[in-house]
Image (tube, rainbow, N blue to C red):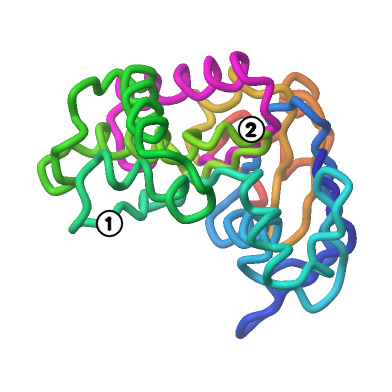
Amino acid sequence: MIELRGIQKTFDRPVLKGVDLFVPEGCLYGLVGPGASGKSVLLKVMTALLRPEAGSVRIAGKDVLSLSDLELQEFRKGIGMLFQNNALFDFMTVGENIAFPLRRLFDLPEEEITARIEERLRVVSLPGFEDRLPAGLSGGQKKRVGVARATIAKAPIVLYDEPAAGLDPVTSQKIFDLLRAEQRATGATVVMVSSDLDRLLPVTDRIGMMYRGELIYDGTTEDARQSSNPYVYQFINGLPEGPL
């Protein structure tokens, strides 16, 4: 499970204003909200890629912010992450990109790494793409490679930041279907940030809504659609008028 308490983070302005968030074990949790509301920053705080000025982060029973650098490296073996821009290395092949977390964090024989790459590429419907370079891939294919890399270590916790950003509706639907199927197959605890509500909401178990650095809703999708909070109701139901 993931538990954040009182998270505060400031850059040139307050970005997170005392956020409390709880994600149960085995849950697929959607994190939504307007742009610049703090969603991506919150994901990075979970992994201590960013450190807050105040608050606590407990993941799988560990006090993340108190871990040493060596302990953090060990802790991150249990987390997969898909960054918003995919973060693929242009000078690496698809296979090398997917294998990167295994080679960086684990001591595995090359035979096992090769087998895992092949298995992940089959799962994301890109068999035989090992030797291709990212420059020759479509946007949807890059996303699929990013998903393969985020899940190759079979981590119990996976974080996805805008997994379908910039994709056409058909490809977006395929990505969300893939992520839900992967979560069901592994039982991982997943937090997914997305602006594509039409495709995100049907696959989530719970959602949270960020607004101006605060978590203003946490609950089921159905309850969110009927929320008495005008900000939540407008955003979830896609209404153009209102206070947002």
Q: Amino acid at mark 2?
A: Ile
The question of residue 191 being in magenta is answered with yes
Between 55 and 215, which is closer to the camera in this rendering?
Answer: 55
List x then y, in percent, for residue 14: 71, 76
Q: Amino acid at mark 1?
A: Phe
Residue at the disc numbered 1: 89
In the displayed structure, 133 sits above or below 153; it is: below
- The residue most toward the left is 136
Label 2 environment density (alpha carbons within 10 Å; few <14, some 14–19, many ≥20)? many
- Going 75% across and 25% down the picture, which residue do you hit? 26
In the displayed structure, 187 sits above or below 109; it is: above
In the displayed structure, 142 sits above or below 170; it is: below
- Going 79% across and 78% down the picture, which residue do you hit? 53
List x then y, in percent, for residue 189: 70, 32
Residue stretch in magenta: 165-194
Label 1 environment density (alpha carbons within 10 Å; few <14, some 14–19, many ≥20)? some
Residue at the disc numbered 2: 236
Between 84 and 105, which is closer to the camera in this rendering?
Answer: 105
